[in-house]
Amino acid sequence: MKLVAFLWTAAVLAQTPADWAATANNRYMMTPNITYLVANNYEAKLDLYKRRDAQGPQPTLIFIHGGGWVGGTKETAILSFLPYLEMGWNVVNVEYRLGRVSRAPAAVEDCLCALRWVAANAKHHNIDLSKLVVTGGSAGGHLALTTGMIPESAGLDRQCPGVTLPKVAAIVNWYGITDVADLLDGPNRKSYAVAWLSSMTDREAIAKRVSPLTYVREDLPPILTIHGDADPTVPYTHALRLREALNKAGVPNQLLTVPGGKHGGFTAEQNLKIFAAIREFLKKHNLPVK
């Protein structure tokens, strides 16, 4: 989701990007670095963007940054969720414990706790819990999937007890990992996955516990996956296997394949088509699209 997607959505509304950018500060307020969890002496924070003129609950995006669970920051993500701000949505931009702070499953636990924070603070921040969409790319795509798919019964939310975890309305997964164990050994071995689980004696069990494929079942929200078929960082087979499992379980889903696409870095034309598909996906599942 690059800036070009934002420019396209502005054009759809017959409004120049300059007009929208010039008035954005009047339309939105941003509260940075809200601590939603303290774990291992680490304060996990999120940034909240919400409309100044909001009357009642608003559709809200939960954005989770990538970086192989061992890198990345929420501050680099703003261009990725500008299209949702332009559509009038609230945005919750989430950070989490990276591998250098805590190994797996910490990042998964943290994002579930961020979801719980959203639920606990929804009324105060005009968040519509029936219109939550979670998204991210790469490791962020994986965490978007786990956040929207893992049930409370899995026990990965126990470090932040509180209100019931809400069910998200949809997941938009940008080339996310769906089978963590697949990246630990063999032909698909990736250094970032090895670093996240390190030399834990039970790393195979943990990898399964944090893999979206483990949680496929019929009552999941609709899932849109975007993945390049030449991705060298997260194998395209992860998207194919997720689609197959979701289809078998009867979960509404769509796989948007980017021909020749690598790990993000898609062309302007490709991004235009991707975000058009996202808008249609949201509309199809009764989520507001301006």
Image (tube, helix red, strand yellow):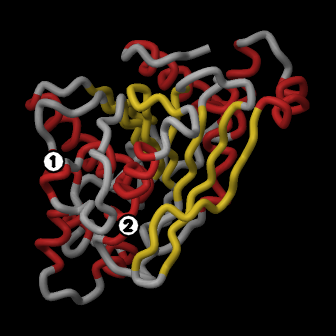
Question: Circle 1 sits on which residue?
Answer: 215
At which x and y percent is residue 10? 74, 21
Q: Is residue 195 shown left or right of residue 72?
A: left
Q: Which mark is residue 204?
A: none
Q: Circle 1 — which element? A: helix
Q: Is residue 119 shown left or right of residue 72?
A: left
Give the total number of marks visible in the rendering: 2
Which amino acid, by three-letter code, is at mark 2? Ala
At which x and y percent is residue 124? 56, 39
In front of the other: 165 or 61: 165
Q: Residue at x 47, y 48 (%)?
A: 136
Q: Residue at x 57, y 51 (%)?
A: 93
> Would you identify the image quadrant in which residue 216 lies?
top left
In front of the other: 124 or 75: 124
Q: Are marks 1 and 2 in contact (CB under 8 Å)?
A: no
Does 154 appear above or below 264?
A: below
In front of the other: 39 or 191: 39
Does 282 appear above or below 155?
A: above
Q: Residues within 10 Å of mark 1 (few under 14, many from 20)?
A: some
Question: Circle 2 sits on which residue?
Answer: 107
User: In the displayed image of the protein, which residue is found farthest to the top?
Assistant: 14
N-term mark: 1 or 2: 2
Which amino acid, by three-letter code, is at mark 1? Tyr
